[in-house]
Image (cartoon, rainbow, N blue to C red):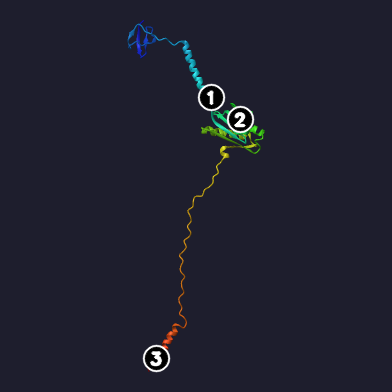
């Protein structure tokens, strides 16, 4: 049978046989347009190999799906802390499912005993914790429940905090007040007056020395002298005459 070389690659060539079929054969130094009578055809993939490849591809896809589900359901994206007198903390996944529950103090360890939390929503677990706190006497009418949500995702933190606050407020309506960490720890601002420059004392006008009253002539001193002089002169003139 004669084959016409249609395409050449480094490791293989594509030839056209007399029946019009294209075959992939080993490149034994062929050139495009060359006619050959003998070729070394590559074996087609075996059916078992095809099945193995398909199974491997499906397994890879399944692993990706499982990894995505693990990140959504089992990987903690943040924490929710609930403080009454008992102090408890929940690790929560991205979809709001509780992954772990732990007490932060001795009363918290007592409170979480017997509370089911795995794969439950954080709102449902928080309701159960509030109910158990009332049963054990930790939470009374008029009490306060403080929740604090922490996460590297600010959008997830704000959304979880708002939803949980609203849900717990409805559950404890008329019994206790629900506060968030921001409401419970508002900073106290102390006004600081700016430094005022020292006030200079008012300038006093210069002290004027007291004015001495005019000197009055002594009675009988000046006029008497003049009179005495006149008298003396008249006497002298009389003597001369």
What separation in Å lies between label 1 and label 2 (alpha carbons)?
Answer: 21 Å
Q: Quadrant of residue 27?
A: top left
Categorize mark 3 by other alpha carbons within 10 Å: few (<14), some (14-19), many (20+): few
Which circle's residue, 2 or 3, is located before the other in the chain? 2
Residue 125's tag is 2
Residue drawn at the location 57% of the way across and 37% of the way down:
181
The answer to whether the residues at label 1 and label 2 have Cβ atoms under 8 Å apart is no
Q: Which residue is mark 1?
A: 70
| Residue 33, percent from left and from top | 32, 11
Residue drawn at the location 39% of the way across and 93% of the way down:
239
Determine the secondary structure under disc 3.
Answer: helix
What separation in Å lies between label 2 and label 3 (alpha carbons)?
Answer: 144 Å
The answer to whether the residues at label 2 and label 3 have Cβ atoms under 8 Å apart is no
> Would residue 97 appear left or right of 34 to someone viewing this image?
right
Q: Which residue is mark 3?
A: 236
Q: Nearer the viewer, residue 200 or 77?
A: 200
Q: Nearer the viewer, residue 99 or 50?
A: 99
| Residue 3, percent from left and from top | 35, 8
Decide: is 4 above or below 60: above
């Amino acid at each position: 049978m004669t084959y016409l070389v249609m395409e050449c690659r480094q490791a293989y060539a594509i030839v056209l046989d007399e029946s019009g079929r294209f075959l992939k054969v080993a490149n034994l130094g062929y050139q495009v347009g060359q006619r050959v009578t003998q070729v070394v055809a590559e074996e087609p993939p075996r059916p078992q190999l095809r099945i193995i490849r398909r199974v491997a591809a499906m397994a890879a896809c399944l692993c990706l799906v499982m990894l995505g589900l693990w990140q959504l359901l089992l990987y903690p994206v943040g924490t929710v802390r609930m403080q009454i007198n008992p102090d408890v903390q929940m690790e929560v996944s991205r979809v709001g499912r509780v992954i772990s529950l732990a007490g932060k103090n001795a009363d918290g360890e007592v409170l979480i005993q017997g509370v089911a939390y795995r794969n439950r929503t954080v709102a449902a677990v928080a309701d159960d914790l509030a109910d158990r706190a009332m049963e054990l006497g930790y939470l009374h009418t008029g009490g306060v429940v403080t929740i604090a949500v922490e996460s590297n995702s600010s959008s997830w933190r704000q959304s979880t905090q708002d939803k949980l606050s609203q849900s717990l407020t409805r559950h404890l309506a008329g019994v206790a007040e629900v506060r968030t960490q921001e409401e419970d720890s508002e900073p106290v601002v102390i006004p600081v007056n700016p430094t005022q420059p020292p006030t200079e004392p008012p300038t006093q006008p210069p002290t004027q020395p007291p004015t001495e009253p005019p000197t009055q002539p002594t009675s009988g001193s000046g006029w008497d002298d003049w009179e005495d002089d006149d008298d003396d002169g008249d006497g002298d003139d009389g003597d001369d005459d």
